[in-house]
Image (tube, rainbow, N blue to C red):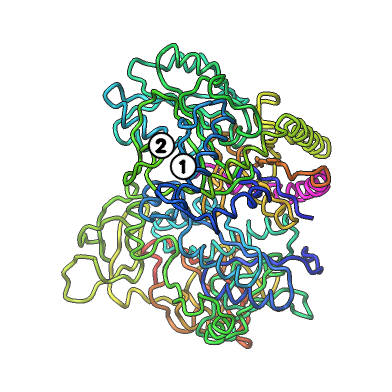
Amino acid sequence: MIPVPETQGKVVVAMSGGVDSAVAAALLAREGLPVVGITLRIWSSLRPADAEARFDSCCSPAAAEDARGVAAALGIPHYVLNYEAEFDREVIQYFTDAYLAGETPNPCVVCNSRLKFGSLLARARGWGAVRVATGHYARVQRDAVTGRYQLRRAVDSRKDQSYFLYRLTQEQLAAALFPVGHLSKEDTRRIAAELGLAVAGKPDSQEICFAPGDYRTYLRQRVGTAIVAGTIRDTSGAVRGRHQGVAFYTVGQRRGLGIGSPEPLYVIDLDPATNEVIVGQDRDLWTREVDVEHVNLIASEALTAPRRVLAKIRYAQAPAPAVMIPLHDGAARLCFEDPQRAVAPGQAAVCYDVNDPDLVVGGGTIRRKGGISNRQ
Amino acid sequence: MRVYLDHNATAPLHPEVLAAMLPYLTDRFGNASSLHAWGQEARSALERARTTVARALGSGDKDTVALTAGGTEADNLALLGVAAAAQARGRHLIISAVEHHAVLHTADHLARRGFEVTRLPVDSQGLLDPDEVRRAIRPDTLLVSLMHGNNETGVLFPIAEAGRICRERGVPLHTDAVQSFGKLPVDVDALGVSLLSLSAHKLGGPKGVGALFIRRGTTMQPLFHGGTQERSRRAGTENVAGAVGFARATELMLQDQADAATRLADLRDRLECGLMAALSGVERNGHPAERLPHTTNLAFAGVEAESLILALDLEGIGVSSGSACSSGSMEPSHVLTAMGHPPERVASSVRFSLGRDTMPEGIAYVLEIVPPMAERMRQVNAGRTPAVGVPA
């Protein structure tokens, strides 16, 4: 049962101000669809520090202005919505909570599922729109046999962002449009240039949009008082030093430990319960088994038996052969053929079909193993 | 159909205003401070315009009117100008919690520079108790600033009573009459004010022109330096065309002010009643009677105002919430918050402000579009928390 009507209606395009969403809007407008551009304002317009740092920009950082300029050039309506409180509640809160719990969050996954294809989609329906489009590099196709909406990797595999979209439900995918998913990044830029869009040459964003630079600086400002220094131990339980707070470390991290050691030491585990950072050698970072929770399946409705997949445990990685085994309570275990290095709890593990490697099977959030003793 | 119901943001320029201004943007381009014929022509037009605005305020003395680049500048000049001149006497300022940002933020600015600001509360209907003014005045109070008609709710403050209290205590009273001027009689003596702010574009004049009435004997310091224009209260080459447009808009407004007020109040009431009859959960923000004739502020329970405003725009209807910032996105209204409304109600409130060009057909169109749209949004929003609220 797909709850989205098949009728054509308005299409809301989430416009970040970048080139991808600009071209997404342009392609839809070129098809003659009634397109409405939306930019989510997630930054504060009221905090004096923000306002004074940017003369003449009460609440108009350049990105929203860029999106507005593109919309004007395309002749489509455009609105900036105040998402400050909602972004704070849904994304930033999650982001800081995860770090405080010793995990490595994936805010883009959460923003896509809860905001762009969550509340924005709901609002869009209130405006009489049936679709939400973004500038993501991914594809949605409806399976003729099963009727399921399938998420596929982008044509431009270097730019593929299906990893950040794995949490979308069938209802969300049914309403999603990714117009640049069929393009290479070069084509996207070329189209933007042909249309004379000012954002054609804008560099790609590489950072977390709300915490540019070092995320530790952001955490310090935002939840500094909740971050407590503690003990660094090694795998034998011996104290090896002090850390600044588990939130400042990520599994696999080598720098910034401040420990002298003949062999290189890495963070291999973060224990929020004891507020300890556990360090070990490179060999301690490798594991074949990765448990994921809150699994969202896209290719099929349920996972009833082990399934051979290609899985990746971080965005910038090639998928590796594994078997996905169903566990209880919406969890699953991934058993990789080859050990994986530096598996960070909190990150997404996303699985692709072993025979059709563009097809997203589903994914979940990597769960921390029960401490050092369970680590393989 | 396109229906503009955001006249408190700005009103369309009246064609006769444009016609009056054009000669001063073309042939009669002189600088009003020049000695020659070109300058004299401009000077004469400027002073005629000043006289028109002064008379409209019940002031026979044209030199009480200092022309500015708008209402915000007039408010800034009133607060900062008096504060700078009266520092020796005191550093205490009284405003209300629901002032326009031009007053509110200027008072905040003064507070950061060592002035003490008392912000008077309003009741749940947006009304101000004049006794609050009486109680708040201190020996070191240098200025009281209270708006005449509220831009978000249209609620009127008892300026004449506040004026009497201030005169008794020897404290100058400033009022921001940007929204009320042209819609209600505004007489500086009846109101008992020392300072009064105006803006031209709210009444069909051009943007970028306003005025501050300054009663003789009010000690002020200028904000700008570099010339003796406006009796040394505002340096800078005068905006002659703007002043002429301001005066023409004022004349046009005064021609049928009472009739227009009756007509607009009737249309507004039809809009209110029509929406309340067609839709459950619609509540008025602000006192039903003590308000401007052309403004209504309505809360639509379970509907996000930002979303409704956007969807109405897509249907050709222009409305707003009280305070949009320059990016166009919404901020929670400090006016409705000060009236004690909870964040959900604040975030679901929409302002409709009518003007001379508002016709019954436009109101009928709004009554046709809004109810089903609001119902659809309620269905979509059911079970979701509102996006717009007080920032964490």
Report the chain holding disc 1: B
Is residue A44 visible in this depiction of the protein?
A: no
- Disc 2: which residue: B77
Report the chain holding disc 2: B
Nearest the camera: A344 or A205?
A: A205
For the N terminus of chain B, give its image quadrant: bottom right
Q: In this view, does A296 lie to the left or right of B192?
A: right
Reply yes or no: does residue B367 show up in magenta. yes
Residue B68: give its label.
1
Q: Position of residue A49 (x, y in %)?
A: 36, 49
Nearest the camera: B272 or A173?
A: B272
Furthest-top residue in view? B168
Nearest the camera: B149 or A278?
A: B149
What is the three-letter code of the residue carrying label 2?
Answer: Leu
Instruction: For the residues labelled 2 and 1, say whether their Cβ atoms are less than 8 Å apart.
Output: yes
What is the three-letter code of the residue carrying label 1?
Answer: Thr
Q: What stretch is highlighted in magenta?
A: B364-392
Q: In this view, does B218 lie above or below B164?
A: below
